Structure formats: C-alpha cells, structure tokens
Image (spheres, coloured by chain):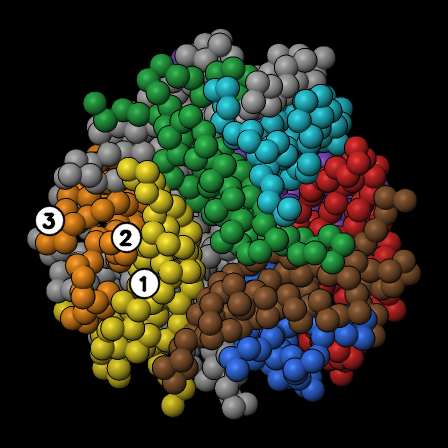
Chain colours: A brown, B red, C blue, D purple, G cyan, I green, J orange, L yellow
C-alpha cells in the first residue's frame, strides 16, 4: 500500500580535502547502517581551521525507511 | 520542578490518499512508541509520482518526553 | 585522517526560572550521554503558561561525535 | 480611489479532527467580525497531545479592511 | 527607567501609483492613531491587477509605544 | 469539544539590564491583561545605544485565548 | 545513465471547497501535460474572500522531466 | 466554479533610473502577454555597476491565469 | 537604455558522480537554448538512493535574457 | 584569469524623504571609496519616527573588488 | 539633515559563563571603538565543548555611524 | 579565560573552473591575512556567463580572531 514512514537524522561529515569528500564520508557512514538510506538533503557547508589545517564540514539530513511496526524512537532513540 | 527534557525526531509519512492521511500515518507510528509523543510540527508537504501513482509525503518534527535520567542518545541514538 | 562523522539531535529543555536555565537543563542532560557532546545551536525560545505558571522552553540542536564504525541509526535510532 | 488600508492579525484555530477543520474554526471566528475578512495566509501547522487526545493547531495571518478614517490601533488595539 | 513596552501590528497599504505611495498611505493611517508610531519594517511588496488596473500593496509591521499600565490586548485587541 | 481560537500579538519589551529582563518586562505586561496569556515565542533580540546607555530589546509573539464568541478584531482591534 | 534534467514551474490551484481540493485541481492540470509530472512541493496556502465566498489557494512548485535534447526554455518558455 | 489554475514565472526587470522603474519595466513586459497578468510579488532588489553606470535590478514572481484546458507546460514550457 | 528583462526558470540536474557534475549537466542543458543564459543560483542539493545507486540532484534557478518585445509567457510558457 | 575576490560590507543609508533616496545616500557613500563598488543587495527597509519626523532606513550589502594581493581584513578590518 | 550612513560588522563574543555574558563581551569590545556603536542584532547562539569545558558563542551584527565623508571601506576595510 | 571576540567578513571568490575552486580562491586570500582565519560558512553559490565564459561565484562568511584590545572597526573598518 502507499503508506510508509521514514525517519530523518542530521549527520555532519568532515574531510580535510573538500566538501564533496565530506559528503561522501557522511553518506558512506549512513549507508553502513542496517536500514536503507533513502535520500538526503545538504543543510550547511562550513569550514574550520585548527592548527593551520583546513577542515571541510557538511551537515546532511539523511532519511531511512522504517520497517512496518518499527518505531521512530525504539531503543532509546 | 519545572525541568524537563524532550527529544525531537523528524519523520516522513506517506499516503496515496491525501496529505492529512499521510500526517495520520506518521503520527500513528509515532504514538506506537513506548515514549509519550508530546507535540509535532509540519515541516514540508511534497508529492511524488511513480508509475502514474501519486504519493503524498509529509515531513513532521515530532517531540517525545524523556524520562528523568534518560539520555537523548541512549542506545546508539 | 581528518574524516569524522557527527550526529545531530534536537532536544528541548524547560525551566520555570529562565531561558538560560532551560539551556543548562538541556545541555546537562546531553552531557550525561556516553558520547561526547561536541557543539549545539539554539533553534527556538518559547514560553508557555499552564495554571498561571510560566515555563521557559528552549530547542537546541546538539551534536555528538560518532566513533569509527558506529552507525548514525544503530539500535533503532 | 486606489488607496486602502488593511490590518493583519494572527489567530490560531484548534480542532481534534483535522488541520482543515482547525482552519475552518479560525476562519469562521474571523468572519463573525463586523469588519470584512479579506484574505488569510497559513503560517504554521502543529499538533499537540494532551491526555492521549490529539489536537490540531493552525496559525493563520488574517487581514481585515479598515474603513476610511479607522485607525489600526483604535480602542486599545 | 529603561523599561518600556511596544506593540506591533501588521498593516497593508495600497496605491495605484507606486510602492512608495502605498507605504505613505499605510504610515499616514498609522500616524493618525492616538498612540505614537515608533518604527516600522517593510515585510512584503506585491501587486495585483483587477480590471486592467495595477494596484501596489505593501505589508508593514508597525510598532506603537504602550503607555505604562496599558495592556497589549485591552478593549478586545 | 477541542475547538478553540487564540489571538497573537507582537510586543517588544525593553530593559537596560539584560535580554532576560526585557522578556520579563514584556511578559509581565502581557499577563496584566484580562485575557489569559497562553504562550509566546521569541522573535528577535536587538540592542540600541542612546546617549551611551545600552538598551536591550526583545520582540515576542504572545498568544491569548479568545472566549467563545469573542472576535479577533472586536473593539477596533 | 544517471544524467537527467527536470524543469520546475510554479502553479496555483484554487478551490472553494478546501486546500486539499485546490491541490488536486493544480496537480490534475499539471498531469494533463504531455510531459511527465515527477514531483511537487507545497509552497504556500492562502485564502481569499470575494463577495462573501471563501476561495482556497495553494501554490505548488511542480517538476517535469525533460527529454534528452529538450531545452528548458524551448518555444518561448 | 471556484476552480482555477494560475502559472507563476520569475522575471527580472532592470533600469538605470530606480527600483520603481525596474518594476515598471518588468510589469509592462509581463502585461504585453496574451494571458492576463493576475498578481506579482517582489522577490529581490539588487544593483550592479558596470563601467561606472549603476543598474537597478528587481526580481518579480508574476502569475498568469491559465485558460481551462491550457497546460502549465504547453509548447515546451 | 538600461532597460532589459530576464526570465528565470528552475531546473534540476542529476548525476551519479557528484554535485558538481549535476550542476554541469543542468547548465549544459540550459546553454543549449537559443536564448542566452545569463546567470544561475544554486537553490538546493539533495541525494537519492535507488536500487543501491546514489544520485546527486541540484536545483538551479537559471536566468535568460528576453529579446525586446519577447514575452515572458509566449508560446504557452 | 577567472579568479577574483570581492569583499562585502553591510551599510545602512537613511533619508527623511524616501526609501529610494536612502538607497542613493548609501550607494553614493560606497562609491566615494577608492575601491570599485561592484554590486549591492537590498537587505531590509525600515522606518523610524523621532520627534514626529519620519526617517527611512535601508540596509544594503555592498560588494567591492579586492586587488590582487589585497587582504580582506587588512589594516584592522 | 536626515542623511546618515551606518556600517555593519559581524562579531562573535564567547564566554564560558552564559550567553548573556558572551553578548556583554562582544558589546564591550565594540564600544571600545573610536566610532559610536549605534545598535546591534543577535544573529545566532551556539555552544561548543572543548576538553570538557562549555563555551557560549553569540554572533552579533553591530552597526557604527560613519562620519560625513568617511568611507565604508577606508583603510583596507 | 573563556572570553574571546571574532570578527566576521563576507567575501566572494570566483573561478572559471568549479565551485570548489572558487572556495579555495576565497579561503586562500583570507588565509594571507595577518590575523588567524578561524572558520567560514558557505552562504551562496551562483554562476555568471560573460562572453560565453562561465564563472563560478561563492559567497563565504569568514571569521577572524581579534587580539585582546583589538577593535572590530579599527583603522576605518
């Protein structure tokens, strides 16, 4: 049927190479999950300098599909 | 007294009937949780067409009350 | 190197004293977590009156560092 | 002539049925006014749970036409 | 002392000449008030065509100073 | 059942002490009203300097419950 | 392969029944197009009163898939 | 009946005189259309300097009424 | 002199390589147009997963210069 | 080659005549600079009343081109 | 005359005590300037944890009055 | 102690290669400064076409740490 429920979570990936690498880092981690990553949205792109080293930081909202009966805050979420 | 902590989570409910049904789908899933759903905010209303079928998608921010001592990211959250 | 992943969660702290106390309540709860709280952003400041008593409510987005291999939605998150 | 002045006011309608009923509740109250309701804009859709009962809440900005000479803050407004 | 309270109200002024005339129409009406208009902010500029005639519409948030003891919703506001 | 209507109004409280005092000034004035203040939202925090004195200014949207039959723009509102 | 281009257009559907009917009116018109409607986003919900009749107005951003070689502004677009 | 559909398009008018002239330039062009311009919204006001000459640029969202049966993306739109 | 009119259109380019490739895909299509592409603005960056394949999606607002006398909605636009 | 750097600064121009005069006041001051003003964006339009006199205030973000080797915060900026 | 020009600058004040102290830190620094600080706006409130110590960070837009003839980007600004 | 002050400045970097190169151009210029660049935020990504050549333009807010006693608008800033 047409009824499904997805859960969104914000994650921030960092890289000292580029914003696109930071996105790949975050998406790769999200895809290691047991659940299916369905889509994501880029929310913010920032950079930080620590001890002269530039770090790229990208905030993503990532969305996973919940299984039927699975609860959005199960197990302490 | 007066001190409590709530945790927010984004969920997306879908329906092939209407936006109000998609909201009911999402809220019903959130209410199955062991925690008490306290309030929610409608964030976005979108629609998608796949193989000629229209799907209504509503993104909600839902908020649950944390019990005293319960941690917002317990159990891997 | 340089690659890390953080997870964000929205929490709401309340207090019947002040907004700054409501922030402290929320941050204190977040710091009880086993994970390291890394930073937070104030999202909204609201107040509610119930039975003549004023309650300050602050919504924060809080960000925790994920350990290598830890998944953003592990254990039902 | 082409010169007229309208006044806007925010109202929140609630319903335990649906968002569309909450909008009707708010618009019906606004239309009881002696002034002419001219248009409205939906600003926010939220829901609350109190004692297990779901309440739909819709914030509208409603706009009334002021008569010539009528002041936007007459009588304590 | 440094404690004062202002009340804001949204008004829309229209003109068939220009946006600046529509602003003057709205401000002039606000200044007819017995209270002191303190400041305003331009919120939106729109236009409408009705029977081939162009109407400029400007939404302003206008702010009045409340006298000590005066209530923001006195007399039905 | 379940149907109520609230009215929102923007107010600005000022203080030469702090933002939290400016909020208290605005809320105290709103609570002097005959109507019940239900909730408020902080919209903006600004400061002004006049003759070397710092003034804190906080804009709040405050919401009052309308009695059944009471109109959102009664008495010139 | 993974390269495609979609074109977005804003449309406003109106109804004197409800917002959900206004959405259906707009989506139905968009689906009469020769191109494939792919998804849409609700941008704004407003209402207008003309001669005592309430009209619901919904602004949608609708997105169509462009065929390979088809140009986003072909034929005067 | 209450069912109609409007189509929105963004246009930018420029002038070396003023923002109000740039708006007139854009609206005049939109009104040359065979379709009826119904309303517009000012989205952005920018200026550019090229070879020492100042150019005022105003972005408008303009809305036209579609005839019954007319499609929002007919003829390559 | 100084008076010109531009038309904006939203397009979404996709790629299974990267966001920058998705932008190139969209811009390349826009440049195939008979009209001159003048500038564009990145509006949103999203990603989707379908059958395990990651798709990058970028929404651009692209602006074309209209020739004198050319109408923003000519030929069904 | 295609690499250049611009610096943005916010300025507020005021006038007791009109918003367009306030913009001219701000732009004129920016153009007195030794650097080349490249473009500006209107950020906010407000008005203030002091001793019964209306003052128009426009906030602009103005952008200057930096010479090669010139630093965005040279000389205390 | 009614013509003046102000310059805005973003500053971030930090404190390990509270947000209000961080605001005082930033405003105190701004007031040490030779120019007159005229007003400020709170833009963002964040917190960071470094080595277990909580740091409050407040971003302010501060506005100074320019003297007649003074240029917004004099001396490298 | 925990008290420090940072100053933010908007800069725009351009490149005819890509957005990531435009960011590098802007960050490199900011790092040539005598002050320490602390962090930056991507604000806008635009593109322009001039004589058939595509130029990528990225607006960054960059933040520098002020030394104790250093003033945010020293030397004409």
Percent x, y of residue B70: 77, 80
- Provide the residue designation for mark 3: J32
Labels 3 and 2 share a subunit = yes
Rendered view: G19 above or below L8:
above
Real-space Cα separation, disc 3 to disc 1, in angstroms: 27 Å
Residue located farthest toward the front when viewing the structure as drawn? G1
Q: Is residue A9 above or below residue J8?
A: below
Q: Distance between the Cα atoms at labels 3 and 2?
A: 27 Å
Indicate the position of residue B48 as horizontal and vertical percent values: 73, 40
Horizontal side of residue L11 vs A43, given as left or right: left
J77 and D49: which is toward the camera = J77
* G41 in relation to J35, above or below: above
At mark 3, the secondary structure is loop
Q: Give how far across and how far down residue A51 sits, in percent.
A: 38, 85
Please report the residue visible at 50 percent of the width from the left and 69 percent of the height from the top. Answer: A57
Q: Residue at x 67, y 53 (%)?
A: I48
Q: Check residue J2 in the rendering and tell me which mark sits there, or answer none.
A: 2
Residue at which label 1 appears = L25
Residue sitting at x 42%, y 41%: I40
Q: Quadrant of the C terminus of chain A?
A: bottom right
Q: CA distance from mark 2 to mark 1?
A: 10 Å
Q: Is residue I8 left or right of residue L30?
A: right
């Amino acid at each position: 049927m047409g009824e499904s429920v997805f859960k969104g979570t914000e994650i921030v990936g960092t890289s000292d190479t580029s914003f696109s690498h930071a996105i790949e880092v975050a998406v790769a981690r999200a895809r290691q999950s047991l659940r299916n990553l369905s889509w994501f949205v880029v929310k913010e792109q920032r950079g930080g300098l620590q001890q002269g080293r530039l770090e790229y930081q990208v905030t993503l909202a990532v969305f996973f599909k919940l299984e039927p009966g699975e609860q959005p805050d199960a197990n302490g979420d």
